[in-house]
Amino acid sequence: MNSTLYENIQQFYDESSTLWESIWGEHMHHGYYPSPDERSRDRRQAQIDLIEELLTQTSLHLSRDLTPLTHSVLDVGCGIGGSSLYLAEKFDATVTGITLSPVQAQRATERAEAAGLDCNFQVANALEMPFENNSFDLVWSLESGEHMPNKKQFLQECYRVLKPGGTFIFATWCHRNVAPPEPPLTESERRHLADIYRVYYLPYVIALNEYEQIAEAIGFCQLHTEDWSANVAPFWDRVIESALEPKILLELLFSGWKTVQGALALGLMRDGYQRGLVRYGVLYGSK
């Protein structure tokens, strides 16, 4: 099952990444909207704001200035290098990015070379990372955890390659909390999630508190979690609005069935946030 899942994820991003970059830019993740008054802000700026907010909140909750501590970075699920290049420039750091998509790895390499930044990208499985123990000052995973078929093994690998004293920053799609006294997922909610899994090639998602429990058991310390659902949910309205533009619709038609299917299902994510089912979880920690 995992090999088929990996193939589908690879094909999805091989097909869609060029279109995403040309229309929506280099950052393949949500945007951050601090307040309802700012929900009309530029979508691409909101994506950069999400990166900055993650770094700011991590520094606050771990009581450390990341800049002098961050020389080597691992970007797990790097896409076409949006976060990687941003972090390399911000911290003057060496950044390694991994992805299942050869198309993404090649494009990320081209972008890093054009920018003159110290980044390298490779195709690798995040559950079996090709790195030595204690290799990175910062392990960064922005919206890739939802693709992992084994959440515990994924976090174990992130912990293994993180240097002692290093920083872990993790943001991922989740579902709502189902721990008592919260009710279990309803049949309607399960069907909704199953539709999201199908079109975006996800094995399953879990609640944020489950990630925290796994991370704590593995050995991460100074753990802190936040639910940013209200801050990122407006992003899907912006993407849906832009996808209806004639130029974008035309490009979508020639982008491959997996990409078309994903575009047609944008409303699933918007509606999932609206009903409180889909959640956006953030976790910071150290080793």
Image (cartoon, rainbow, N blue to C red):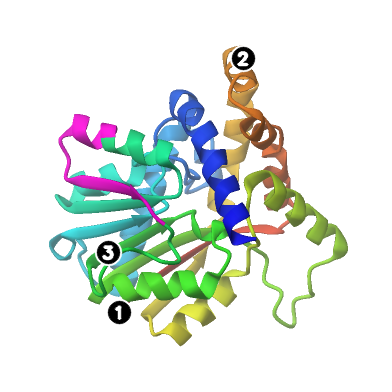
Q: Between residue 171 and residue 197, name the one nearer to us.
A: 197
User: Which amino acid type is marked by label 1?
Assistant: Lys
**Relative vertical location of residue 21 with respect to residue 269 in this rendering, above or below:** above
Tell me the SS state at disc 1: loop
Mark 2 touching mark 1, by CB under 8 A? no
Tell me the SS state at disc 3: strand
User: Which amino acid type is marked by label 2?
Assistant: Leu
Would residue 114 be counted in the magenta stretch?
Answer: yes
Where, by quadrant of the figure, is residue 109 drawn?
A: top left
**Relative vertical location of residue 46 with respect to residue 189 in this rendering, above or below:** above
Q: Where is residue 59 drawn, in percent x and y?
A: 28, 65
Q: What is the span of residues highlighted in magenta in the rendered image?
A: 110-124
Which residue, given by chain and number where applicable, does mark 3 sit on?
138
Q: Where is residue 19 drawn, in percent x and y?
A: 50, 26
Query: Which quadrant is home to the N terminus?
Result: bottom right
Which residue, given by chain and number where applicable, does mark 2 sit on?
250
Circle 1 crowding by C-alpha within 10 Å: few under 14, some 14–19, many from 20:
some
- Image position of 259 (left or right of 127): right
Find residue 150 and name its label.
none
Can residue 285 be spotted in the picture? no
Tell me the SS state at disc 2: helix
- Which residue is at 76% across, 49% downward? 195
User: Which amino acid type is marked by label 3?
Assistant: Leu
* Mark pair 2, 3: CA separation: 40 Å
Query: Which quadrant is home to the C terminus?
Result: bottom left
Q: Where is residue 191 drawn, in percent x and y?
A: 82, 56
